[in-house]
Amino acid sequence: MLSQVPTQDACLSCGACCAYFRVSFYWAEGMPMPDSYTEPLSAVYSCMKGTNQKNPRCIALNGEVGQAVSCGIYEARSSSCKEVQIADAQCNKARRAHNMIPFVEVLPDDSVNDDDFDQVC
C-alpha cells in the first residue's frame, strides 16, 4: 500500500476528517461556537452541523477536501477535533475514505550516545 510522510501543514491540504466523522462533544464545548454551527444530539451532547448525516461535512470546513482547506472556527474547535492527529488511525481512516494516500507516522530515532550528557538548552 502506498503511504506518504506528512508535512507540518498537511491538514491544510486534506480536510478528510472534517468530511468523514460525526463531530460530537459535550454540549458546553459548543458555547464559544456560533449557535448556527451546532445541533443537539442528546441532553448532554451536541455535534457540528453537517456531521450527523450519511455523507458528513462539517459546517466549519472551508475549501475542497484534498485540495486546500481551513477550519472556520479553529481556535474554538471541540476536543473531538483536537484528538485527531496527523497520521493517526482516525486520520488515515478518513483519508482512505476520500481515496487519499494514508500517511505513515515517522518517529525520531532514539539517540544512542547521550546517556551521560546533560541536556543543552
Image: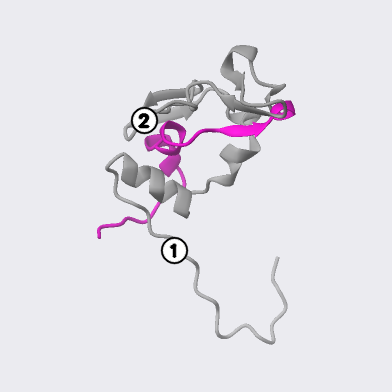
Residue 7 appearing in the image: no
- Residue type, numbered disc 1: Val
Residue 21 appearing in the image: yes
Q: Position of residue 54 (x, y in %)?
A: 39, 28
Which comes sooner in the sequence, label 2 or label 1? 2
- Density class for disc 2 (Cα within 10 Å; few <14, some 14-19, many ≥20) is some
Which residue is identified by label 2?
68
Which residue is the extreme one toward the front?
42
Does the magenta-highlighted stretch encompass residue 13? yes
Residue at disc 1, secondary structure: loop
- Residue type, numbered disc 2: Ala
**For this rendering, which residue is in front, 81 or 69?**
81
Q: Vertical placement of 107 versus 62: above or below?
A: below
Q: Position of residue 22 (x, y in %)?
A: 51, 33
Q: Position of residue 82 (x, y in %)?
A: 60, 41
Contact (CB < 8 A) between labels 2 and 1? no
Stretch of the chain drawn in magenta: 1-29
Give the total of numbered labels.
2
Q: Vertical placement of 63 versus 90: above or below?
A: above
**Mark-to-mark CA distance, 2 and 1:** 23 Å
The disc at residue 32 is none
**For this rendering, which residue is in front, 50 or 8?**
50
Tell me which residue sits at (57%, 38%) in the image: 81
Tell me which residue sits at (29%, 44%) in the image: 100
The part of the image, by quadrant, that contains residue 116 is bottom right
- Density class for disc 1 (Cα within 10 Å; few <14, some 14-19, many ≥20) is few
The part of the image, by quadrant, that contains residue 73 is top right
Q: Position of residue 12 (x, y in %)?
A: 43, 35
Which residue is identified by label 1?
106
